[in-house]
Image (cartoon, grey):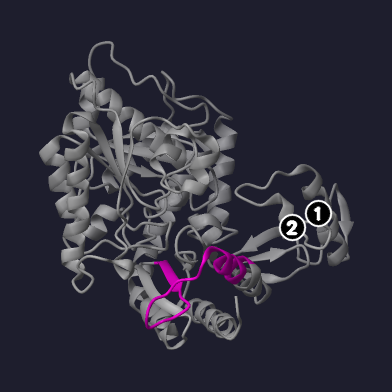
């Protein structure tokens, strides 16, 4: 299909504008957009309709081209239109539509589990499949609780996570999530959530002049929380290698090593939530390889299939898996579509491309250029902080660069939703404006993106931020 032909119910529509309007009306009547304000799309504000993708670009129903600066939703690592992915999916469909991995197994799930075990750090050799990231985190908390019970620690049910952090929206994962706007409508949640400070060095009130000391201070808060709650009650600590919500908070030197020591000291399971960070987003297969730590559990999704099929995974250490390997003990938990033959085949194809085309090396080679390019925006008075790593970056916006004064809630609303997001979209860039904390614009392009792509993104940011700095919000 070309951008000159959009098909609606089998009818070719030549007029892009009419096609876009028709799609928007149909979506408005029947499609419930996720994580969206449905009321924002009235008769004068059409729903954006993305109809196809090619490489790092996507196209709307009007035929307009956009650079996919957020990889769909941190998923489209290899870009769109990869024939190898379609071939892998078609082959899997031809062999078997579906069969569960409840009691049974199938070759694609076995092969992918083996591959993930070979890529994961340390002794993380057991793979429990899910269909997405929230399910992986839900599974990890449940596994941690049952593991402790099997060892006689039946009071260990609590979970520690960082402020502002997002770990999913199922009831268990939502409990681990720390964003009140997501949590409040569904209270009361699962008991046992404990929160500690995020590693937001830009907003540090302690050790603001020493990144490493700040990291140790942050890790110490985890130990304080364990002691305050009682070590015998704490099951797990959930942390992202680089925290997404709030805008790409990177860990200070020594932070992860201190956290690992604390968890070992008190018998607490360390879960590395790598739903976003795994499979090359940081330039490594997993976050532990970037920051030199080995967790007890890795949760992953998104990039595992490069966005071509739904799949998630919980990768577990041999130590945690051991009590489930003997006798009549089981982990009574699962999902129908977990480890689907097609999804696992697509994941294997994606990992193969990452290896053959040296995609992780591309991220590593361009990481410094990405950082320097974004840092060049610091001459704009609205730019406060630039942080991130690999192909995962955030730019925090401020009212006053010198004092770091942030925008109020209403100001941030007008700044991000009222101006920056629509303006970037108008100029052909899709990225993320995040107001789940201080206002941040995030960039996480496909891992195949080039320096020319980085120049394109940063060029648009410069134009939009320059215009935004001259406006009153």
Secondary structure of the residue carrying numbered label 1: helix
Residue drawn at point x = 40 percent, y = 58 percent = 354
Whichever of labels 1 and 2 marks the residue nearer the N terminus, that label is: 1
Q: Nearer the viewer, residue 45 or 151?
A: 45
Q: Pinpoint residue 106: horizontal percent, then vertical percent.
A: 44, 28
Label 1–label 2 contact, CB within 8 A:
yes
Q: Pinpoint residue 452: horizontal percent, then vertical percent.
A: 50, 81
Between label 1 and label 2, give the one nearer the viewer. Answer: 2
Query: Going by the image, does 251 lie left or right of 350?
Result: left
Q: Nearer the viewer, residue 466 or 180?
A: 180
Quarter containing the N terminus: bottom right
The residue to which callout 1 is attached is 23
View extreme (left): residue: 265
Q: Where 385 sits versus 104, above or below?
A: below
The residue to which callout 2 is attached is 47
Query: Going by the image, does 233 lie left or right of 29?
Result: left
Residue drawn at point x = 35 percent, y = 73 percent = 367
Residue 279 within the magenta-colored segment of the rendering: no
Read off the magenta span.
391-417
Secondary structure of the residue carrying numbered label 2: loop
Quarter containing the C terminus: bottom right
Q: Quadrant of residue 173?
A: top left
Q: Nearer the viewer, residue 107 or 150?
A: 150
């Amino acid at each position: 299909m070309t951008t000159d032909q959009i098909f609606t119910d089998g009818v070719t529509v030549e007029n892009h504008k009419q096609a876009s309007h028709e799609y928007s009306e149909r979506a408005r009547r029947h499609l419930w957009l996720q994580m969206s304000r449905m009321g924002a799309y009235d008769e004068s504000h059409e729903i954006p309709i993305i109809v196809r993708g090619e490489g790092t670009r996507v196209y709307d129903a009007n035929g307009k081209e956009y650079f996919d600066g957020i990889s769909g939703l941190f998923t489209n690592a290899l870009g769109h239109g990869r024939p190898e992915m379609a071939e892998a999916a078609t082959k899997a469909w031809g062999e078997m539509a579906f069969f569960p991995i409840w009691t049974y197994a199938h070759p694609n799930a076995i092969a992918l589990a083996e591959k993930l075990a070979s890529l994961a750090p340390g002794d993380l050799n057991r793979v429990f499949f899910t269909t997405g990231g929230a399910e992986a985190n839900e599974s990890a908390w449940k596994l941690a609780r049952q593991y402790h019970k099997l060892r006689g620690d039946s009071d260990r049910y609590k979970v520690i996570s960082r402020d502002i952090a997002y770990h999913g929206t199922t009831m268990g994962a939502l409990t681990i999530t720390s964003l009140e706007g997501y949590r409040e409508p569904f209270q009361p949640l699962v008991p046992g959530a404990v929160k500690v400070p995020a590693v937001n060095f830009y907003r540090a009130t302690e050790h603001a002049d020493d990144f490493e000391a700040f990291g140790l201070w942050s890790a110490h808060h985890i130990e304080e929380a364990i002691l305050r709650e009682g070590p015998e009650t704490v099951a797990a600590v959930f942390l992202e290698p680089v925290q997404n919500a709030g805008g790409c908070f990177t860990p200070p030197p020594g932070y992860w090593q201190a956290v690992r020591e604390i968890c070992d000291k008190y018998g607490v399971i360390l879960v590395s939530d790598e739903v976003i960070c795994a499979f090359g987003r940081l330039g490594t297969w997993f976050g532990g390889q970037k920051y030199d730590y080995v967790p007890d559990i890795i949760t992953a999704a998104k990039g595992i299939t490069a966005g071509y099929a739904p799949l998630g995974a919980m990768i577990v250490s041999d130590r945690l898996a051991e009590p489930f390997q003997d006798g009549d003990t089981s982990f009574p938990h699962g999902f129908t579509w977990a480890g689907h033959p097609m999804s696992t085949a697509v994941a294997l194809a994606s990992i193969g491309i990452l290896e053959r085309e040296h995609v992780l090396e591309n991220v590593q080679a361009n990481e410094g250029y990405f950082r320097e390019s974004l840092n060049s925006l610091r001459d704009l008075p609205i730019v406060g902080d630039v942080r991130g790593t690999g192909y995962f970056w955030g730019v925090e916006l401020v009212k006053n660069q010198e004092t770091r004064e942030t925008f109020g809630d209403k100001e941030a609303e007008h700044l991000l939703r009222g101006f920056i997001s629509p303006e970037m979209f108008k100029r052909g860039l899709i990225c993320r404006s995040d107001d789940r904390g201080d206002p941040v614009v995030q960039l996480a392009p496909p891992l195949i993106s080039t320096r020319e792509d980085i120049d394109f993104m940063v060029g648009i940011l410069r134009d939009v931020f320059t215009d935004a700095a001259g406006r009153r919000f």
